[in-house]
């Protein structure tokens, strides 16, 4: 019996309704509106792995450069992530072996939310 797999794509949309407060004249936003942060990992989906890794590496390096001196825990995490990817970015980058590409993908997923901060709406 042949194995058939059905794939369905879903698209998320956020509806925003805006009304005006009659007393102040300022716009009121519907509570369904959400603000989503898109990091380099999500923004580069579909690009070659080397481009995705390089973009994320540059993003983490910029976060490390802007980090306050007192935030030792985050500094250690960023330095570890950058050291790990620098080790993977050696050798022939024109013909990256599949094993290294898989490691790069794991690195991207592992460090996807590193250096993000939570902001209250």
Image (cartoon, rainbow, N blue to C red):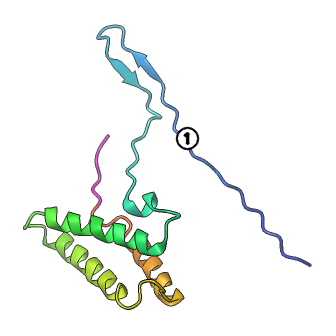
Q: Quadrant of residue 8?
A: bottom right
Q: Residue most toward the top?
A: 23
What type of secondary structure mainly makes up the magenta span? loop
Q: Residue furthest left?
A: 69
Badge 1: few (under 14), some or many (20 or more) residues near its Cα, within 10 Å?
few
Q: Which residue is mark 1?
A: 13
Q: Residue at x 78, y 68 (%)?
A: 5
Work out which quarter of the rendered image holds the N terminus and state it.
bottom right
Residue shown at 21% from the left, 64% from the top: 62
User: Image quadrant for the C terminus?
Assistant: top left
Instruction: Give the quarter of the image for residue 80.
Output: bottom left
Q: Of residues 100 and 119, which is closer to you in this image? A: 100
**Residue farthest toward the front in the current orientation of the protein:** 94
- Residue at (29% x, 78% y) in the render: 81
In this view, 65 is above or below 22: below
Residue 13's spot in the image, x, y percent? 55, 41
- Number of numbered callouts drawn: 1
Q: Which residues are magenta?
A: 116-121
Helix, strand or loop at label 1? It is loop
Q: Residue furthest bottom?
A: 91
Residue 9 in the image: x percent, y percent? 67, 54
In the rendered view, tell whether residue 39 sits above or below residue 87: above
Q: Choose between 114 and 46: the one closer to the eye.
A: 46
- At 27% from the left and 64% from the top, the residue drawn is 115
Q: Residue 21, how many percent across, how many down?
A: 36, 13
Task: Tell me the quarter of the picture where residue 25 sits.
Answer: top left
Q: Is residue 6 magenta?
A: no
- 120 falls in the magenta region: yes
Q: State left or right for residue 30 relative to residue 60.
A: right
Q: Nearer the viewer, residue 54 or 115?
A: 54
Is residue 32 rendered to the left or right of residue 69?
right
Would residue 49 appear left or right of 28 to someone viewing this image?
A: right
């Amino acid at each position: 019996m042949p194995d058939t797999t059905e794939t369905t794509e879903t698209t998320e949309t956020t509806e925003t309704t805006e009304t005006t407060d009659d007393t102040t004249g300022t716009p009121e936003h519907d509570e369904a509106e959400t603000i989503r942060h898109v990091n380099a990992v999500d923004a580069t989906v579909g690009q070659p792995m080397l481009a995705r890794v390089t973009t994320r590496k540059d993003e983490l390096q910029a976060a490390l450069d802007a980090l306050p001196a007192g935030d030792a825990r985050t500094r250690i995490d960023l330095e570890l992530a950058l050291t790990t990817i620098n080790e993977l970015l050696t050798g022939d980058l024109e013909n990256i072996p599949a094993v290294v590409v898989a490691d790069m993908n794991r690195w991207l997923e592992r460090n996807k939310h590193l250096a993000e901060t939570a902001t209250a709406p």
